[in-house]
Image: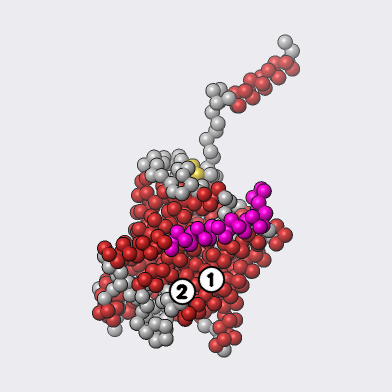
Amino acid sequence: MTVRMLTRLGALIAGLALASPALAQAPAPAIDHGHTAWILSATALVLFMTLPGLALFYAGLVRSKNVLSVMTHCVAIACLASVLWLLGVYSLAFSGSNPLIGDLAKFGLVSVGRDAVTGALPESVFFAFQMTFAIITPALIVGAFVERIKFSAVLVFSGLWLIVVYAPVCHWVWGGGWLAQMRVMDYAGGLVVHATAGVSALLIAWRLGPRDGFPRDLSPPHNPGMTMMGAGMLWVGWYGFNAGSALAADGNAGAALIATHLSAATAGLVWGAIEWKRFGRPSMVGLVTGVVAGLATVTPASGFVGPLGGVVLGAAGSLICYQAVDLVKHRMKIDDSLDVFAVHGVGGILGTLLVAVLASPELGGAGYAQGVTMGSQAVTQVLGVLAVCAWSGIATLVLVFLTRRTVGLRASDDAVDEGLDMSAHGERAYNP
């Protein structure tokens, strides 16, 4: 037997060994340490969005006697959502093959070892990153019911909402559920975060009823500077929110970050210009509200569009969300106190719809999945919006009913007059 024949025989045996499970095992998925380091950092950034970013943003917009109550709501929801995420919500969102809801195979992470891998990440890191999304989403709803809700109602409603609304929708879109199978495009939460929170905020505000003096005789924001600081923290944290959703330290993360930043910047300018034309001067609260509207609008599209797409989304988000604020408060007469639906809900839905167009490679986008056209993607996006909004709305009305029947919903008139800081928590943000 010649040397050449021996060489060929050896190569054949080696090839069979690699191809046959009986002769060789496939290598374990490799953890990418660069990706892991970035997602650990992004996890901190997204938590930073809620604490202290969202807490300060909302607290500056209310009256001084309700500042601590708003902050307490954000902190309490962060704590509650974290525990529930471990005790079943993560598993319901990210396990199983059922198209509607996951199973409890990953309850408590008991069956998830330290060597478990999701993509190129340790599953523990993926768990933590997604947990911060589960924290901020119900916390966004706080802005709809400030200054008049019972603290017990906040806890009961938020906990149930995370299980009944957030977990199923997260599974549909990101956990391999039916919308994922249809290839719906939601890069970082236009549906999962903003549409769910926005629709639920509108309905709980409607069922709770307005603050005294709504809409004409409400006190102005007690500290716009605090709101600006919170908005700045949200802007920075949103880099982790959107760029982190690439789940990798790569060009997709960089593209998402650029689109996110340009959308926020454009939206702030447009909102300020609208106020300047309408009132003769732009306000600080208006500028940062525009920034947040741009951030919400770009979220579902951030990794799919180019820089110019981010500019378009920011401009469209400001223009549409500004009109939505007037629609909700003055035409629908609903006291969505801090404009959660008008800014987050409308912005997230708008971005979810526009991504079907702006993802086109001709417009600088990343393109579509194989066999998908702009038209078919648009149909999928519309279906996703309708399904998520319908489920969020129906479930919210049921949860509000259950909350009212168990612990009550609205704080007493005396508690509201005194301020929820003292009546609910026995503390004041400012000593007289």
Q: Main secondary structure of the magenta part?
A: helix
Sequence-first disc among 2 and 1: 1
Crowdedness of circle 1 by 10 Å Cα count: few (<14), some, many (20+)? many
Nearer the observer, disc 2 or disc 1? 2
Pick the residue in front: 207 or 278: 207
Q: Say if the magenta span includes residue 24.
A: no
Q: Residue at x 27, y 71 (%)?
A: 425
Residue sticking out furthest to the top: 1
Q: Which residue carries the number 2 mark?
A: 339
Q: Position of residue 81 (x, y in %)?
A: 37, 57
Q: Is residue 33 visible?
A: yes
- In front: 85, or 210? 210
Q: Are marks 2 and 1 in contact (CB under 8 Å)?
A: no
For this view, does 405 lie left or right of residue 283? Answer: left
Q: Residue 194 has which mark?
A: none
Give the residue at x 31% y 62%. 402
414 over 32 or under it: above or below: below
Looking at the rendering, the stretch of residues picked out in magenta corresponds to: 368-393
Query: What is the three-letter code of the residue carrying label 1?
Result: Ala
For the C terminus, give its image quadrant: bottom left
Residue 342 placement (x, y as % from top left): 49, 72
User: Does residue 373 appear left or right of residue 31 in this picture?
Assistant: right
Q: Which residue is found at the position 46% from the left and 77% from the top?
A: 332
Q: Residue 206's image quarter?
A: bottom left
Q: Secondary structure at mark 1?
A: helix
* Structural crowding at the residue carrying mark 2, measured as other residues with C-alpha within 10 Å and reported as few (<14), some (14–19) or many (≥20): many
Which numbered dot is residue 293?
1
Magenta run includes residue 373 = yes
* 53 with respect to 363 (left or right): left
**Three-letter code, disc 2:** Asp
* Closest to the observer, 393 or 364: 393
